Amino acid sequence: MPKSSLWARFYAQPYVLLSLSTLFWAGNVIASRLALGQVSPMALTTFRWGGVLVLLGLFARQSLRRDAAVLKAHAGYILLMGALGFTFFNAFYYVAAHFTSAVNIGIIQGALPGLVFVFAYLMAGSRARVGQVLGMTATLLGVAVIAIKGDLATIATLSFNLGDLLMLGACVVYAIYTVLLPRRPKVGGLSFFSGLAVAAFLTSLPFLAGEIAYGQFEWPTLTGWGLVAYCAVFPSVVSQIFFMRGVELVGPGRAGVFINLIPVFASIMAVVILREDFHAFHAVALALVMGGIVWAERSKR
């Protein structure tokens, strides 16, 4: 069978594409932990988006030429969105990995739908049904269980893990980015993503300079370069392409449900690849996060 025919058949399988996209995004969780001692957080962030720009330079030139005028007219918005969704989110994400486990990072990331709902209400006045509110509350309770490690005594001492708080901060930043997305300029998806990637690379440079100035910079080892390559190719580009194609085939509502697989995949890979412990409170938190999302989705329908 010709290779083009094989690719066409593969590219017509929405559930395979959507599952792979979330698997690669979950792999970013594992990469953040594997990066410890191999490459510093801001070096990983900057080099990642630098690698993305190289790839986009090869494949997005025609799209960028067509939409350059519109992107330039919305440069301020694109700079803000690239900084929020790509630079700040990833900076929090990779620093958090120095203080908490991949299991925690993956499950806390599952709180994103709940936080999006909260900020959509605060910033845009979006309303939701009671079932959606209860579902999103359950996801946030799941994050709270992670933060206190299932021990209510932690609340009295306020002894929260810095990494968990940083990861929650990453989710807050990305939730704000998501709420602002509908204001995007009317350009093709590839052009818009390219603009955000340029903004992410540029806004990461001051943070990289600060990392160097404070003596925290770690030049990538061979393994570090492998992680940079993975983050640049799979979570950043391939996942985006696969997810956009999945949305095209089955619609945003059905495709969006697959995002809920990220904490599941991340937890499994953390245990299998990183040999991290999976405690009872992790199971409770995962059940709250996943159950809350399913409840909210059913209520929305």
Image (cartoon, helix red, strand yellow):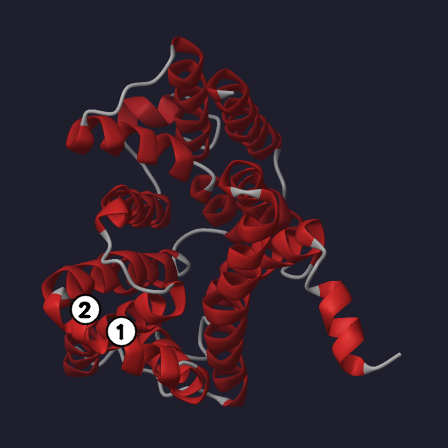
Q: Is residue 122 above or below residue 221?
A: above
How dense is the environment of label 1, judged by Cα within 10 Å: few (below 14), some, or many (20 and up)?
Answer: some
Q: Residue furthest front?
A: 66
Residue 85: x %, y % from top left:
29, 57
Residue 143: x %, y % from top left:
42, 32
| Quarter of the image where one finds residue 145 | top left
Number of marks present in the image shown: 2
Residue in the image at 32% along x and 24% along y:
155
Q: Is residue 54 above or below residue 133?
A: below
Residue 78 visible in this rendered orientation of the protein = yes
Q: Residue furthest right?
A: 1
Q: Nearer the viewer, residue 179 or 73?
A: 73
Numbered label attached to residue 129: none
Q: Distance between the Cα atoms at labels 2 and 1?
A: 6 Å
Q: Is residue 79 above or below residue 145?
A: below
* Residue hosting label 2: 70
| Quarter of the image where one finds residue 13 | bottom right
Seen in the image, is 224 located left or right of residue 245? left
Residue 152: x %, y % from top left:
40, 20
At label 1, the amino acid type is Asp
Residue in the image at 79% along x and 81% along y:
3
Name the element at disc 2: helix
Seen in the image, is 298 located left or right of residue 71? right
* Residue hosting label 1: 67
Residue in the image at 55% along x and 39% along y:
260
Residue in the image at 19% along x and 64% along y:
78
Quadrant including the N terminus = bottom right
Q: Nearer the viewer, residue 266 or 132?
A: 132
Badge 2 vs badge 1, beta-carbon distance below 8 Å: yes
| Quarter of the image where one finds residue 200 | bottom left
How dense is the environment of label 2, judged by Cα within 10 Å: few (below 14), some, or many (20 and up)?
Answer: some
Seen in the image, is 63 located left or right of residue 227? left
